[in-house]
Amino acid sequence: MKFIVSSTYLLKQLQVLGGVINSSNTLPILDNFLFELDGSMLTVSASDLETTMASSLEVESDSKGSVAIPARLLLDTLKTFPEQPLTFVIEDNNTVEISSNHGKYALAYADGKEFPKAVSLEDPSKTVVIGDVLATAISKTIFAAGNDDLRPVMSGVFFQFSTQGLTFVATDAHKLVKYTREDVKANQVAEFIMPKKPLNLLKGILAGSENEVTIEYNDSNAKFTFENSELICRLIDGKYPNYEAVIPKENPNKLVIDRTQFLNSVRRVSIFSNKTTHQIRLKIAGAELNISAEDIDYSNKAEERLTCDYQGDDMQIGFNSRFLTEMLNNLNSDEVQLEMSMPNRAGILTPIDGLDDGEQVTMLVMPVMLNS
């Protein structure tokens, strides 16, 4: 078995696939890339059992075969080469010989048959989305997903597809983000929970991509196919909490403010907040927003005044500044609206501008109790 491939082309594909491989694997074979050659088509796969990703590359060859090559060693070697053709020859003595313009390198390989096979999806449903739309939906929501192993359903992003549009939701019980696209529709209703790792991989690959991504899914697995790659992952099992129930419907107090100004203010003031609660206080009266924080243990305190557009009763409400900063950072509008009903009910943050047609973002942040 022998093939010739461009060093930078191979490296680019392998670096993406390398994101799948865990630093410590239960099965030693998972520390390898699986190379499957069929004529001039080389398919390289990486897996951690939960997620498997494969890319197809064009190479110069007329042989067939499959071998598992150590991922870390191969990546470290490829990173050092300038652009040049590399010749891979699979020898009978269980070594792969790589020849470059300047030298030869030999690595031990394992039998490709030992590599776990990717799941094939039985009778899946199918939806097609533009790559960049999917990447945006992931990056707008994934930061709000939880890290609690005891509540696995909350550690992923909830995909809700219908004939009206697509909805993506993430929450960790302190903050919640709901991202909706009405300009992309599915042909039937479906719901599933995607784990974070494959989503982060997809986000990195698909950002800015105009290509179509085909999403196929059943009760246990999802498969994303785009250009020359496919990613298959196991879904998180369980029922997602009823997030609509926690979004307060009646919010008479509405604050509209410049996003960057608000974000910078929250960032500055939060430096002076208590290091465990990160609590900041918003005091709103008339057209003035007063943001303050205090760390009584160290006698640190800060206060800033901003002008805003406010309709509603005068009120004071406390928030965790880390959550507020994360949310404001994740929006790219010039102005944002914060809707509130009472100091003990969640605040709803929405962008006023900067959205595409059919795109909606709703962010919900739970308040913290103020000790007056």
Image: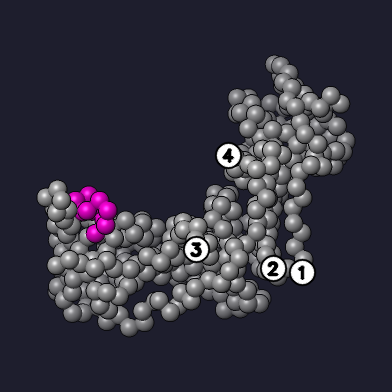
Image x and y of residue 134, in percent = 56, 60
**Neighbour tally class for label 4: few under 14, some 14-19, many 20 plus, Cα within 10 Å:** few
Query: Where is mark 4, residue-wise?
Result: 23
**Is 366 in front, or is 125?**
366
The amino acid sitting under disc 4 is Ser
Q: Please report whichever mark, 1 or 2, sits nearer to the chain's N-terminal start.
A: 1
Q: Quadrant of the C terminus?
A: bottom left
Image x and y of residue 328, in percent = 34, 59
Query: Where is mark 3, residue-wise?
Result: 151
Label 2, label 4: how many angstroms apart (C-alpha)?
29 Å
Judged by depth in the image, the label closer to the viewer, 3 or 4, is 3
Judged by depth in the image, the label closer to the viewer, 1 or 3, is 3
Q: Please report whichever mark, 2 or 4, sits nearer to the chain's N-terminal start.
A: 4
- Contact between labelled residues 2 and 1, with CB atoms less than 8 Å apart: yes
Image x and y of residue 142, in percent = 48, 58
**Residue drawn at the location 16% of the way across and 56% of the way down:** 294
